[in-house]
Image (cartoon, rainbow, N blue to C red):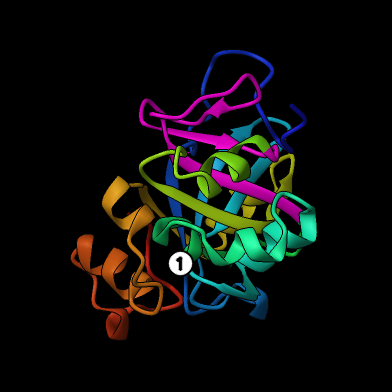
């Protein structure tokens, strides 16, 4: 599967399975107060998904648009599928969908990100979710965030991002409005005390 920034070897990148938390000095307004989950990081670059920005499109509407279901079938979706919130994963390739999910669901195109989390970018997983046979935890995003070689490292050094290990609870927590503050709180950081000159966790 052609996942941007995916690893060609089995060696994980040092930011895989990490949260990037936008600092107050973030120069790109598209990423203000954003939390990004890093799916792949290597010497060639990095790829991740913003997990706390919402798309206006509803999941049932997306399934109809993709031809996975017709409108009558979409009305009868199981609650977990019907209520799945579509995130704005980033400014790159915004028509393309990605599903981050627990490892209890795997297809040939699924890419392991960590011991517990996989990334799948094919329509198979949408069919499984709509049928109620998908993963226990799932997060869908349209578009992704990408960096070229050395770009993310430079942005971190310039204090654009704080990094910390991701947790399943905070990754799949449906409370998007408070996710930024809750992840900072999990590090013992009060957002009001953040400085654009602060160090890194």
Q: Residue furthest top?
A: 10
Residue beneath the point at 63% across and 50% down: 152
Total tally of numbered discs in the picture: 1
What percent of the width, then of the height, locates residue 145?
67, 55
Q: Is residue 169 left or right of residue 128?
A: left
Q: Which residues are magenta?
A: 96-123
Local packing at callout 1 (Cα closer than 10 Å; few below 14, some 14-19, many 20+) is few
Rendered view: 59 above or below 41: below
Residue drawn at (37%, 25%) of the image: 115
Residue 34 visible? The answer is yes
Q: Which quadrant, please, contains the N terminus?
A: top right
State left or right for residue 176 relative to residue 75: left
Q: Tell me: 94 left or right of 182.
A: right
In this view, the residue farthest toward the bottom is 192
- The answer to which image quadrant residue 92 occupies is bottom right
Compare residues 166 and 120 and report the one nearer the observer.
120
Q: Per the image, is 41 magenta? A: no
| Residue for point 57% across, 62% down | 158
Residue under label 1:
83
Q: Is residue 89 visible?
A: no
Judging depth in this view, the residue of 96 and 46 nearest the camera is 96
Instruction: State the quadrant of the C terminus.
Output: bottom left
Q: Residue 89: x percent and y percent?
A: 63, 60
């Amino acid at each position: 599967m052609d996942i941007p920034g995916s690893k060609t070897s089995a060696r994980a990148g040092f930011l895989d399975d990490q949260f990037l938390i936008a600092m107050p000095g973030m120069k790109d307004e598209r990423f203000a107060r954003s939390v990004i989950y890093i799916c792949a990081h290597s010497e060639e670059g990095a790829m991740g998904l913003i997990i706390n920005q919402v798309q206006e499109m509803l999941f049932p509407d997306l399934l109809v648009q993709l031809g996975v279901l017709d409108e009558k079938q979409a009305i009868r979706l199981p609650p977990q599928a019907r209520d799945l919130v579509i995130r704005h994963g980033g400014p790159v390739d915004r028509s393309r969908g990605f599903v981050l999910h627990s490892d209890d669901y795997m297809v040939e195109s699924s890419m392991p990100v960590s011991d517990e989390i996989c990334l799948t970018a094919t329509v198979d997983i949408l069919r499984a979710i709509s049928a109620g046979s998908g993963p226990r935890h799932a997060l869908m995003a349209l578009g992704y965030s990408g960096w070229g070689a050395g770009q993310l490292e430079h942005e971190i050094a310039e204090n654009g991002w704080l990094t910390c290990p991701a947790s399943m609870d905070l990754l799949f927590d449906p409370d998007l409005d408070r996710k930024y503050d809750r992840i900072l709180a999990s590090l013992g950081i009060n957002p009001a005390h953040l400085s654009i000159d602060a160090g890194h966790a």
